Structures are given as structure tokens and as C-alpha cells.
Image: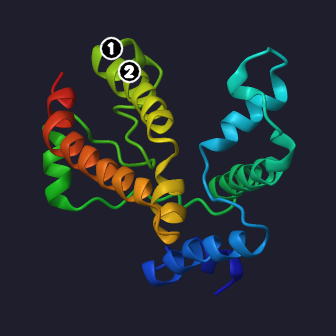
Amino acid sequence: MSLIEWLRQPWAWYVAGPLIGLTVPVLLLLGNKSFGISSSLRHICAACLPANIPFFQYNWKSEAWNLFFVSGIFIGAIIATTLLADPSPVKVVPALQAELATYNIYDYHHLVPADLFNWPALATVKGLLMMVGGGFLVGFGTRYAGGCTSGHAIMGLSTLQWPSLVATCCFMAGGLIMANLILPHILKL
């Protein structure tokens, strides 16, 4: 098996999980850095917007490492989707396929269903709610919670921060409510 074939295989939780978890002590050892993705947008805005907005008036250069980190994620995503992509359709359990069929979702050739996420769907109420409304809620929730799921659930819980425990519990509860109570109604539109 070549290296590319090995990398294309899904990694087990007991390999991927510890690798993600090890980022916390590495960042702490490399200069007491905090892991999180959503803060990089603030750093980009602070670097690129010359406006006199108080939220962006800070020493963003001290957080430049975060921009390199996010750039690495972006480049890694490009490599993964071009070199490591699996051309076969996504494997979906038959019971879930039957449930998704009730919402007119049949295409499993991509990581997200093309039946839901495409340009023409954006002009529908369902597409507008899911893509624009969902994007707004994620952005608002990230700002309101003072960080994203990766920052709170990975870094915050690892460093025993009470606000991160509260935020992570709220993320989980919100996800369960959305997936089980609200999303089925949106998918029926």
C-alpha cells in the first residue's frame, strides 16, 4: 500500500482524536497559545481593515501564528480534496437513506448532499434558511459564546475553563435540538 493509499483511508478515532488533542499541550508549550479557529477572522479583519473600529484595535501581529495555522488548514483541505479525495459515493446506512429519501435527498456523491447545497437551492426558502440563516446563527453563536466549538471544546475543556464547559454543553444541546426537532421541519419545506 502506497503512502497516498494509506492517507486516503479513514483514520480511526483512537489515532485522529489524540492527534487533535495533542495540539493543546504543543500550543501551550510553544508559548502559551490558545487553540481556536474563529479568532482568526478577527485577526484577518484587524490586519486588513484600516477602519477605526475598537474591536479590531489590538496587536494582531502577536497572534500571527494563528493565521499561519488557519492557512495550513486551508492548504490541507485543498490537498485533501484534490489528492486524497475518494471518488466513490459517501457510504450512508440504509436506514438513514430511507429517512433522507422522505426529504427528497438522494445524492451521496459529495460530503454534503447536492440536493440541498447548490446555487439554485439558495433561491428557495429551505436553502435560504439552511445556508444563510444557518451561517448567521453559527457566526452569531460563535461571537456570543466568545469562541467556536474547537476553541471551547478542545482548548477550553483541556485547560479546565468553566465558560468553555458551559459553552460546550450549550453547543451539544443546541445541536441535538436542531438535528432532532427543527431540521426535520426545515427539510420538509
Residue shown at 37%/41% (left/top)?
Answer: 113
Give whichever of 162, 117 is nearer the camera.
162
Q: Answer whether residue 102 is visible to the viewer in this image.
A: yes
Q: Is residue 89 visible?
A: no
Q: Quadrant of the N terminus?
A: bottom right
Disc 1 secondary structure class: loop
Residue 124 - label: 1
On screen, 43 above or below 3? above
Foreground residue among 92 and 31: 31
**In the rendered structure, which amino acid carries the disc numbered 2?**
Ala
Percent from the top left, x then y, of residue 103? 18, 34
Left or right: 156 in relation to 124:
right
**Quarter of the C terminus within the rendering:** top left
Provide residue 28's location: percent of width, then percent of height.
69, 71
Give the answer, above or below, for where 93 lies relative to 176: below
109 or 76, nearer to the observer:
76
Tag 1: residue type?
A: Thr
Q: Residues within 10 Å of mark 2 (few under 14, many from 20)?
A: some
Q: What residue is rendered at 46% in x and 52% in y?
A: 149
* Outermost residue to the bottom: 1
* Residue at the image position 45 percent from the left and 49 percent from the top: 111
> Which structural element holds mark 2?
helix
Can you identify the residue that label 2 sits on? 121
Q: Position of 155 compared to 73: left or right?
A: left
Tell me the distance, in whole angstroms, between the alpha carbons under discs 1 and 2. Answer: 5 Å
Left or right, 78 with respect to 12, comes to right
Image position, residue 141 (x, y; %):
42, 35
